[in-house]
Amino acid sequence: MTEQTNQIPTEEKKGFFRNFNYDKHYKLLFFIPILILILSLVYIGIFYSKNGDIIYKDVSLSGGISITINGEIAQSQLEAPLKEKFPDVSFTQLTEVTTGKQVGLQIKSSTNSEELKSEIESLIGYELKEGENSSTESQGASLSQDFYRQLIIAFIISFALMSIVIFVMFRTFVPSAAVIFAIFADIAMPLALINFLGIKLSAAGIAAFLGIVTFPLLLLIL
């Protein structure tokens, strides 16, 4: 006797997936982004309740000091001892675009500049001279907070204007709401991921989120 099997032949499997009716079952596919968005919003809410803000802010938004050391500096040499004394310190490696070679190391913290500078000098074994082997930038806390508030206000206004333009152009609720939902999800999901990874956002990072809102608006206008 020939043994029977319930397995679908390869051609039939391919045909099944090829003929899958997306127009009929598209509502089921909506559950994936909706679920991810809900999880993102829940995480952002928990993050806000713990930190009092929706993002980790770097020096450009919270105020502090930024020291850039020129040359190839091993981050591992500085990271552990500096974080022990300055818990909020962060590092950014500066590299050449074409070769990827390290040209410097940027160290940011909200601590006193002289204290951080002297600690770095003791770790690397030489003096940091402004304009020769390093550069220092400081940002006042009040000025940074004002700048951050202005960026948030600009973001909210841009999102509101974008929503109005979309409703005016489509003139129907469902496609307008779908576009606005998609743009909102493109903001909330990366924001939750950035917070989860512990990445500090700078003014440029806020501007990038602002671009998510303004770019579709420009496309619709043009």
Image: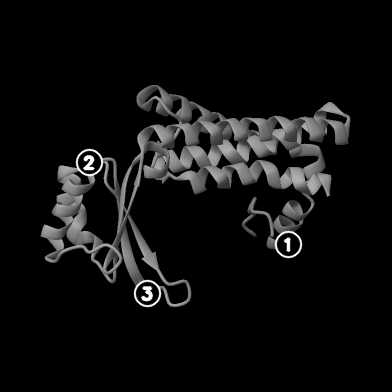
| 96 lies left or right of 172 | left
Give how far apart the Cα atoms at labels 1 and 2 are. Answer: 59 Å
Residue 33 in picture, x, y percent from top left: 62, 37
Q: Which numbered disc covers residue 221? A: none
If you read the primary sequence from the N terminus, does the residue marked by circle 3 or circle 1 appear first? 1
Residue 133 in picture, x, y percent from top left: 26, 68
**Residue situated furthest top in the rendering:** 49
Reading the image, the residue beneath label 3 is: 101
Q: Which numbered disc covers residue 87? A: 2
Quick one: SS at disc 2? loop
Frontmost residue, 79 versus 195: 79
| 208 lies left or right of 8 | left
Give how far apart the Cα atoms at labels 3 and 1 are. Answer: 51 Å
Residue 131 can be seen in this image: yes
Classify 10 Å Cα crowding around label 1: few (below 14), some (14-19), many (20 and above): few
Q: Which numbered disc covers residue 11? A: 1
**Based on the displayed image, in which of its 4 quarters is residue 76 positioned?**
bottom left
**Residue at (80% x, 35% y) in the render:** 166
Q: Amino acid at mark 2?
A: Pro
| 60 lies left or right of 32 | left
Frontmost residue, 144 versus 219: 144
Classify 10 Å Cα crowding around label 2: few (below 14), some (14-19), many (20 and above): few
Quick one: SS at disc 1? helix
Q: Mark 1 or mark 2: which is in front?
A: 2
